[in-house]
Image (tube, rainbow, N blue to C red):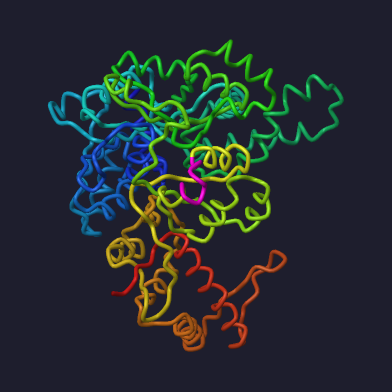
Amino acid sequence: MINDAIAKSYEAANYASHAYEQSFIANLHARARLRGLNPKAPNSAKVLEIGCASGGNLIAQALVFKDAQFTGIDLSKAQIKNGKTALKKIGIKNIDLLCLDICDATAHFGSQKFDYIIAHGVYSWVPPFVQKAILELCGKLLSKDGVAMISYNVYPGWKFKEITRDFMRFASSDVSVEDEPERKLDVALGALAFEQAFYRTDLTNDSYQLVTRQAKAALGTISHLPRHYLIHDYLELCNYPAYFCDFVADGEDAGLAYVDDMQLCFDTKVLAHEALRQYEKASFASRVQKEQMHDFLNATAFRHSLLTLKENESALKLEYKDLEFSGLFIGIKAKSQSLKERSKNYASHDLICALLDAYPGTISCDEANGIAGGRLAECVFELISKLDVAIYFSSVPFNAIKYEAGKSRIRADYLGFLRFLASPENKNFVLCTPKNGFYALHKNDCEAVFMMDGTHSKADIVAHFVELCQKNNAPPSRIIDGKKVLIESKKEQEAYFDEAISTLISDLEAQCMFESIS
């Protein structure tokens, strides 16, 4: 069976167990609230993740929302086994992982209902009959006010990528992705290197250059992507992108209605000229048609669509001016001081300054609306569409807490998780952060993190590592001009560790990994 082949390939090449902020239930709750829905508050919610791998996308959520109950299902026995081992070591009790075929899930759960259903990185990578089962599951297992987030590859953006995928699969067709995924990828990447060398030759045919432009652009970035992602996105048997309008229609057949997208922001205002806006208004009447039109114009390749039961559709707020901001929180995903300068002539300038000051924390939407002069919806649209600012809405606040001995410490509820990350038992987990993002914390960094307990200053931590180097005669090293150079003098070691520990603390601050000492 095809499902057996999919399970075998995922066990042969496990995904790193990550968290994904687009599936954070505080963000799903906020986005649904913005659109006029009233899903259950995250802290007491029942959550189902379809295709949970080892549960990495649920760990941080379970730590943040301790009274919520999380269930994850996956076809891979190895992934579920790894996840259960990790949860036991960490001490998390509000996650249940099950090895279960998606097609059997609706019958398995029976009359149970879930307030949030998450299917990230699954829908496009299963055959059509399983895609249908995912949508039907959502239609039958969502609670009355529940929402589901499904991510998937979309056309037309994936049309260009399919050229690369098809070539990679053709070039490595003699190697089985189920039995030798790593070797298959090496063969495919070798073929891409050959293709790149061909494109570097002097091709003067303009029309030919146009045809290959997107393929060449993909070749320039694909080698930097994680190997497990390349194996499953470019070499797996199943990768079925869909047009957005077809996905919505399939959802409607399962009793679901489209709510919003967790990342994209489309509106007629992005069209610069009145003639274009009038043409769009006359030619694309529905919201779905408009968004599909924008996908064509922007070559959209991926979506995170939020769905609810069809019976809730009449409650949706479809216009930006009608969005429900009250009681929610807003933040920016990354800090850039150039934003202050770039936004000087925009209505959203004061809001930008407030969000930068709050980073990595949030401010309430009520406060933000006051700063925006009662025009928060317009300013939000301006931030996204004109200033290209990545913002998010959350139903829970986050505070900016810097590390300072005697005043703050690493979050106590994360200590079990951090101990597991540092242990030999950890094979494929990374640090999943309170905002449900992920951070590549090296095992060697964990010793420094454990010292950030509020009793050690940064200087104490630096001195500790310098002392270890001196005592064990094990100097750190840098790569200079491709060569490994040992840092042997104490003064240089102090400078090296001061920089390293400062960077680590700054990164953890940005991930909201510290709490105040009361």
* Quadrant containing the C terminus in the rendered view: bottom left
Any part of residue 171 in sight? no
Residue situated in front as seen by the camera: 79 or 405: 405
Is 440 left or right of 193, judged from the image as shown?
Answer: left
Residue 362: image x %, image y %?
Answer: 43, 55
Residue situated in front as seen by the camera: 3 or 88: 88
Any part of residue 492 in sight? yes
In the image, farthest residue toward the left: 111
* Quadrant containing the N terminus in the rendered view: top left
Relative to 276, does residue 217 appear above or below in the rendering? below
Is 251 left or right of 189, judged from the image as shown?
Answer: left
Residue 160: image x %, image y %?
Answer: 62, 25
Tell me what residue is drawn at x 13 percent, y 26 percent. 110
Residue situated in front as seen by the camera: 343 or 50: 343
In the image, farthest residue toward the top: 283
Residue 158: image x %, image y %?
Answer: 56, 25
Relative to 46, does residue 466 appear above or below in the rendering? below
Magenta segment includes 375? yes
Numbered circles on residues, count: 0
Relative to 504, does residue 337 appear above or below in the rendering? above
In the image, farthest residue toward the front: 373
Magenta segment includes 496? no
Is 173 left or right of 253, judged from the image as shown?
Answer: right
Residue 76 found in image quarter? top left
Tell me what residue is drawn at x 60 percent, y 26 percent. 299
Residue 198 found in image quarter? top right
Residue 345: image x %, image y %?
Answer: 68, 47
Write the start and end of the magenta stretch as one range: 369-376
